[in-house]
């Protein structure tokens, strides 16, 4: 064999180098400040995208793109992950996901206790009857069928979900306050197995609400042991975020330990002024558990108010049996008297957000099902009580009866100082705990919490740029690689060659949340371009009409 002559070797290397430098991409993003999700220092560079994949990152000096974007002055980051999304209905109504896409969110994660499957016939009937402004047919049974339904319908973001412990309990036990029979628990465990193999991320719970409140620690451990076999996660709205916060955190840690499962605290907070001082004790418990080898993480939203329903102001016993039984009991004078007394009395037996808010003027009514009550939207419970000449407790009970629902409600509960301290925790990621709405059409029939439009933008604008709570690179890490790693999802959450091209470009000088409690239907500004699976869904801040969203599967997924 003849040796290769140096001249020909030089020509060969020049040709190879030239080809590499003159590479053409479907999309070339040039001169952006790249924050790759790792938390490492940013750098100016280029990114080439081919089809749905990040093909190259770096200087790419002589590269070209079929589409080229000059990202000078913009941050280029992985698409953001919303760890707690309630866009389960809003995406059916409008697949554009406007509220979140305009903040750079490319993955919506569902499953806080309730998931959109598995459903039985009676659950489907109840869901249809409970629908408010958004109406839809239920064309699925399992959780995976729901997620596939969304992507086939057409959505802009990717979607993933935990299977809800509440959903499993309703499926087998209904709304009764009792322990499941061994047969019922076996059925629940089988449904976890099926969900995990179909791509669920793990088991999600929401333990302050009936009927989830009736679940024992042992029941949750049994379900989590199944999810753990598939390397899933347990994620929980813990049993108390107020008077029993530390004890409820102990329960989550116990479940993680006994089931051998990673665990995350949904929307970590210290509810009620008398509990604000517990921040340090919470951090100490989580850090101790992590030091002992458990994987405990948390997520949060960037506001001092939470949002749920008036059910969170009433004792769980009165809600046993579901809404119809609840509303029926509230019309019994003897029961009303007892409920009113319990609503007024501080207790460690159940989580009262009315008590945590401390005053009915800090309870804002945001969502009514009944059109005749929508004029009360945006008023406080104190204002409506005064209008009606009743106590706040009686008013709350009457509204639940009259509206045919739990009534969407905003509670002002948290400390601004604690919000800032939580943002800086190394194990903290972010979730809106809201839908992804459009500031138009049916969505304007009800109010909402501003977090639905501003959770991410508020972090990056108010807390990172303006108040410098954490560096921008760290914030991007907590919106991308950290949650992706916690969830053990593949090839997302970072700008790495070979990863899916979920990419956001935003102006760090102008990114801003604009939604307020008084005027929540206001889009965030400052996000310029968003790509999902390599397809541009936001261009110069405007939606492109593209729907490339796919189902993102958990670590136990078995592709049949």
Image: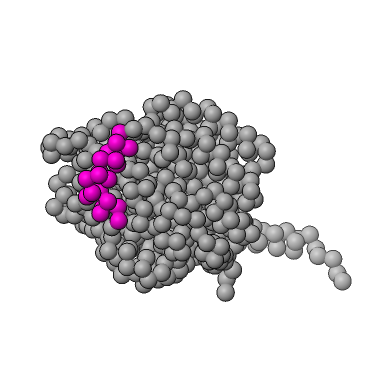
Question: Residue 466, how many percent across, how many down?
Answer: 39, 30
Q: Nearer the viewer, residue 212 or 427?
A: 212
Can see residue 148? no
Is 326 colored magenta in this rendering? yes
**Horizontal arrangement in the rendering, residue 44 relative to residue 74 (left or right):** right
Q: Up-down: is 474 above or below 320? A: above
Is 304 colored magenta in this rendering? no
Q: Up-down: is 186 above or below 270? A: below
Q: Which SS type dominates the magenta stretch?
A: helix
Question: Residue 39, how many percent across, how many down?
Answer: 56, 40
Residue at image location 32% in from the left, 63% down from the top: 127
Q: Nearer the viewer, residue 422 or 350?
A: 350
Residue at image location 51% in from the left, 39% down from the top: 248
Corner quadrant of residue 287: top right
Residue at image location 44% in from the left, 64% down from the top: 171
Question: Residue 229, how many percent across, how many down?
Answer: 64, 59
Can see residue 2? yes
Question: Residue 144, how many percent across, how many down?
Answer: 47, 67
Q: What stretch is highlighted in magenta?
A: 325-344
Residue at image location 41% in from the left, 69% down from the top: 120
**Horizontal arrangement in the rendering, residue 316 relative to residue 490 (left or right):** left
């Amino acid at each position: 064999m003849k040796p290769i002559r140096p001249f020909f070797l030089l020509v060969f290397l020049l040709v190879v180098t030239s080809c590499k430098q003159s590479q053409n991409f479907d999309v070339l993003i040039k001169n952006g400040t790249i924050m790759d999700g790792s938390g490492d220092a940013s750098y100016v560079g280029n990114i080439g995208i081919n089809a749905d994949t990040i093909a190259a990152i770096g200087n790419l000096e002589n590269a070209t793109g079929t589409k080229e974007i000059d990202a000078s002055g913009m941050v280029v980051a992985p698409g953001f992950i919303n760890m707690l999304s309630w866009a389960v209905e809003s995406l059916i109504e409008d697949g554009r996901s406007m509220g979140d896409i305009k903040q750079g969110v490319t993955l919506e994660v569902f499953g806080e206790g309730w998931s959109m499957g598995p459903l039985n016939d009676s659950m489907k009937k109840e869901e249809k009857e409970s629908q408010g402004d958004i109406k839809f047919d239920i064309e699925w049974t399992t959780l995976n069928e729901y997620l596939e339904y969304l992507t086939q319908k057409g959505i802009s973001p990717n979607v993933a979900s935990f299977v809800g412990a509440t959903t499993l309990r309703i499926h087998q036990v209904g709304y009764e306050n009792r322990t499941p029979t061994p047969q019922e628990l076996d059925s629940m465990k089988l449904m976890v197995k099926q969900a995990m193999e179909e791509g669920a991320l793990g088991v999600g719970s929401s333990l302050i609400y009936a009927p989830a409140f009736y679940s024992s620690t042992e029941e949750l451990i049994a379900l989590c042991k199944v999810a753990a076999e598939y390397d899933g996660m347990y994620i929980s709205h813990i049993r108390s975020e107020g008077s029993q916060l530390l004890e409820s955190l102990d329960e989550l840690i116990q479940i993680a330990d006994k089931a051998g499962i990673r665990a995350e605290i949904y929307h970590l907070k210290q509810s009620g002024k008398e509990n604000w001082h517990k921040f340090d004790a919470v951090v100490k418990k989580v850090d101790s558990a992590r030091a002992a080898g458990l994987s405990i993480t948390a997520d949060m939203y960037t506001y001092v108010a939470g949002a749920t329903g008036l059910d969170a102001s009433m004792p769980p016993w009165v809600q046993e049996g579901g809404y119809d039984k609840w509303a029926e009991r509230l019309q019994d004078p003897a029961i009303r008297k007892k409920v009113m007394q319990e609503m007024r009395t501080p207790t460690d037996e159940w989580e009262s957000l009315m008590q945590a808010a401390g005053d009915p003027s800090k309870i804002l009514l945001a969502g009514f099902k009944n059109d005749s009550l929508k004029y009360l939207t945006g008023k406080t419970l104190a204002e409506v009580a005064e209008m009606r000449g009743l106590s706040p407790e009686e008013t709350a009970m009457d509204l639940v009866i009259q509206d045919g629902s739990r009534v969407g409600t905003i509670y002002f509960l948290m400390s601004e100082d604690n919000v800032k301290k939580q943002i800086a925790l190394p194990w903290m990621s972010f979730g809106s705990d809201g839908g992804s709405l459009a500031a138009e059409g049916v969505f304007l029939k009800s109010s909402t919490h501003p977090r639905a439009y501003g959770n991410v933008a508020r972090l990056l604008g108010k807390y990172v740029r303006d108040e410098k709570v954490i560096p921008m690179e760290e914030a991007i890490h907590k919106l991308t690689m950290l949650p992706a790693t916690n969830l053990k999802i593949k090839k997302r959450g970072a700008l790495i060659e070979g990863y899916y091209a979920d990419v956001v470009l935003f102006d760090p000088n102008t990114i801003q949340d604009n939604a307020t409690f008084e005027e929540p239907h206001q889009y965030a500004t400052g996000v310029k371009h968003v790509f999902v699976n390599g397809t541009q869904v936001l261009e110069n801040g405007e939606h492109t009409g593209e729907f490339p969203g796919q189902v993102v599967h958990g670590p136990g997924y078995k592709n049949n």
